[in-house]
């Protein structure tokens, strides 16, 4: 049997309480996972009814937002819950279900091997000791589903992320670009796209080696993300090419952001080793804004603008007509 620890702290205007409890991972057969108990409307549930229902219900999804919504709904059937808030800094996850109220009950979640973040329940009135005991009992049903959802999220992020630079990969770009084009058309909002290419990057690899070249790529990717408004909309497109999607950004805004990126990278101090001279790095950037074209045509327009920038001396920003 695996054990999980839940550290709980209730915070009120006049008092606070700290205590730790230990929960256990239940044994779930295939039948108990899929044959969920059903409750007729108006039926009074016991704590045991709710716990058994949660054991089965929380096995049905690996989406963290959906899991927390299901948990909040089930717990609310026996305890008044105003809102639910989850945060995991290490996994960069923050989920808010409802508006925060005056009083809260805060749980720090962990297993023997993993820190799973913090879960907060709030409402207008103070939680009683009996309600806290019930919450602690029900929280044991959520520990491992939350852990599994976090691991699934991590695996999905890895599948969509370039291992070297941390930017999105080609698959992530294709998915995000199709989504952003659809949103742009639906809400009649501008969408711009940048293709960024490191100038003479082959010379960096040839002169300094591929290890240094990889270090330069990582620094450039980080700088692009820092200078873009949305770091999660930066993608590695090819060996030394990156794509940035700029939602709600017209031609004028795209030009400003492109020039900001170009100037910042030109000032980068990419050093091979401590004490050595910096490696000069510049980029050429092609920009395009969505009009009547589709996702593929938008990429092609930006690529043509990039070709123009490279043909005119590099370290330039060019915009597609």
Image: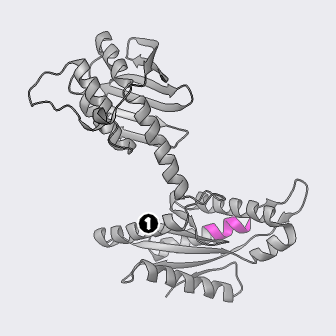
Viewer-proximal residue among 117 and 36: 36
Q: Is residue 273 above or below residue 283?
A: above
Q: Which residues are magenta?
A: 261-268
Number of numbered tags placed on the structure image: 1
Viewer-proximal residue among 38 and 110: 38
Q: Which residue is at a point 46% across and 12% down the rendered structure image?
A: 19
Q: Which residue is at a point 35% across and 18% down the rendered structure image?
A: 137
Is residue 198 a member of the stretch shown in magenta?
no
Task: Mark 1: give few (<14), some (14-19) or many (20+) Cα within 10 Å.
Answer: few
Is residue 265 a member of the stretch shown in magenta?
yes
Q: Position of residue 237 (x, y in %)?
A: 58, 71
Q: Position of residue 187 (x, y in %)?
A: 29, 68
Secondary element type, mark 1: helix
Viewer-proximal residue among 172 and 263: 172
Q: Quadrant of residue 306?
A: bottom right
Q: Position of residue 76 (x, y in %)?
A: 23, 27
The answer to whether residue 230 shows anywhere in this view is no
The answer to whether residue 24 shows anywhere in this view is yes
User: Which residue is tagged 1?
Assistant: 175
Q: Which residue is at a point 49% across and 53% down the rendered structure image?
A: 156
Using residue 126 as the reference point, say whether residue 1 is left or right of it: right
Q: Quadrant of residue 62?
A: top left
């Amino acid at each position: 049997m695996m054990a999980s620890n839940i550290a709980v702290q209730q915070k009120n205007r006049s008092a606070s309480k700290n205590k730790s409890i230990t929960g256990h991972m239940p044994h779930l057969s295939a039948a108990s996972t899929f044959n969920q108990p059903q409750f007729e409307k108006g039926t009074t549930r016991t704590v045991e009814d709710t716990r058994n229902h949660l054991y089965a219900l929380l096995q049905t999804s690996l989406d963290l937002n959906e899991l927390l919504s299901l948990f909040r709904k089930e717990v609310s059937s026996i305890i008044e819950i105003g809102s639910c808030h989850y945060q995991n800094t290490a996994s960069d996850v923050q989920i808010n279900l409802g508006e925060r109220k005056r009083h809260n009950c805060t749980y720090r979640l962990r297993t023997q091997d993993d820190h799973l973040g913090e879960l907060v329940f709030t409402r207008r009135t103070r939680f009683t000791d009996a309600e806290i005991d019930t919450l602690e009992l029900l929280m044991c049903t959520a520990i491992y589903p939350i852990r599994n959802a976090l691991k699934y999220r991590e695996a999905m992020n890895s599948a969509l992320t370039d291992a070297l630079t941390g930017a999105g990969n080609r698959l992530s770009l294709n998915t995000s670009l199709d989504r952003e084009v659809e949103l742009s058309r639906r809400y009649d909002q501008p969408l711009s796209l940048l293709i960024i290419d490191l100038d003479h990057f082959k010379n960096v690899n040839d002169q300094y080696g591929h290890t240094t070249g990889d270090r330069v790529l990582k620094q450039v990717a980080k700088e692009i993300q820092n200078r873009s408004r949305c770091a999660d909309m930066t993608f590695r497109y090819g060996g030394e090419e990156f794509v940035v999607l700029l939602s709600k950004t017209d031609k004028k805004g795209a030009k400003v952001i492109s020039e900001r990126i170009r100037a910042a990278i030109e000032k980068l101090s990419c050093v091979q080793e401590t004490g050595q001279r910096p490696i000069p790095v510049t980029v050429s950037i092609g920009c395009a804004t969505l009009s009547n074209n589709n996702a593929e045509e938008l990429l092609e327009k930006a690529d043509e603008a990039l070709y123009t920038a490279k043909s005119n001396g590099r370290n330039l920003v060019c915009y597609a007509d």
